[in-house]
């Protein structure tokens, strides 16, 4: 039986900050403010992975719904793990939503329209945040733009390349 070579290398893929911002439609200053306010974490090496992209997209939805960073931080930190695991386990997640009670900032994850009613309390104002479509869009954008992380060649490799160039200069068409 013949084996086929996968079209992409078997390595971890990432995107840079510009691509992360492009995928999630978040301004750089807005995301940096979220990092400063401890809403999300930032990568020191500048490589962002799929979970980082999903996290930024989901935080954007929560900030928009709560209209305040303090409330958004409380909602995100209390629902982060359940949201990320639910989004990771679903391919399209079109019905996945977060029911957020605005007074108590209580979030309940629902996977169908039938679960929305039982997730709310009578006479409590709530917001229904559709997280599934945004997560699917962020995941698709990440997979479109992701590339294996580029590593700088070490000094030894650079010297080998320089030595090879010195011995074998590129030929010029005559």
Image (cartoon, rainbow, N blue to C red):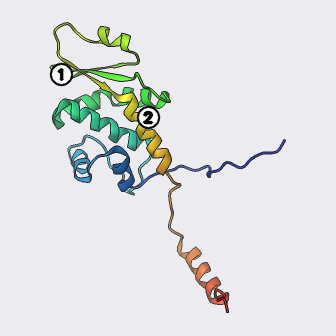
In the image, taking residue 102 as reference, residue 143 lies left or right, namely right
Tell me residue 146's x, y (percent).
49, 51
Spot the residue most to the front.
174
Between 147 and 45, the one nearer to me in the picture: 147
Point 39% across, 31% down: residue: 133
Q: Which residue is mark 1?
A: 102
Labelled disc at residue 87: none
- When the figure is inspected, residue 119 is found, relative to residue 3, above or below; the finding is above
Point 17% across, 19% down: residue: 104
Tell me if residue 155 can be seen: yes
User: Mark 2 falls on what kind of element?
Assistant: helix
Q: Which residue is mark 2?
A: 136
- When the figure is inspected, residue 53 is found, relative to residue 94, above or below; the finding is below
Tell me residue 154's x, y (percent).
53, 71
CA separation in Å, label 1 and label 2: 25 Å
Point 23% across, 44% down: residue: 34
């Amino acid at each position: 039986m013949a084996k086929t070579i996968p079209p992409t290398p078997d390595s971890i893929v990432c995107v840079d900050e510009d691509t992360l911002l492009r995928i999630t439609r978040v301004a750089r200053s807005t995301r940096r403010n979220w990092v400063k306010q401890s809403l999300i974490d930032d990568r020191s090496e500048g490589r962002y992975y799929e979970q980082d992209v999903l996290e930024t997209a989901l935080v954007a939805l929560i900030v928009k719904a709560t209209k305040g960073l303090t409330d958004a931080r409380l909602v995100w930190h209390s629902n982060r793990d359940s949201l990320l695991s639910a989004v990771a386990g679903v391919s399209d997640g079109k019905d996945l939503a977060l029911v957020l009670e605005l007074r108590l900032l209580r979030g309940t994850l629902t996977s169908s329209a039938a679960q929305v009613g039982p997730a709310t309390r009578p006479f409590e104002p709530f917001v229904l945040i559709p997280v599934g479509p945004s997560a699917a869009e962020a995941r698709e954008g990440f997979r479109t733009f992701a590339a294996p992380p580029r590593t700088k060649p070490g000094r030894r490799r650079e010297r080998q390349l320089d030595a090879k160039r010195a011995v074998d200069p590129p030929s010029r068409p005559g």
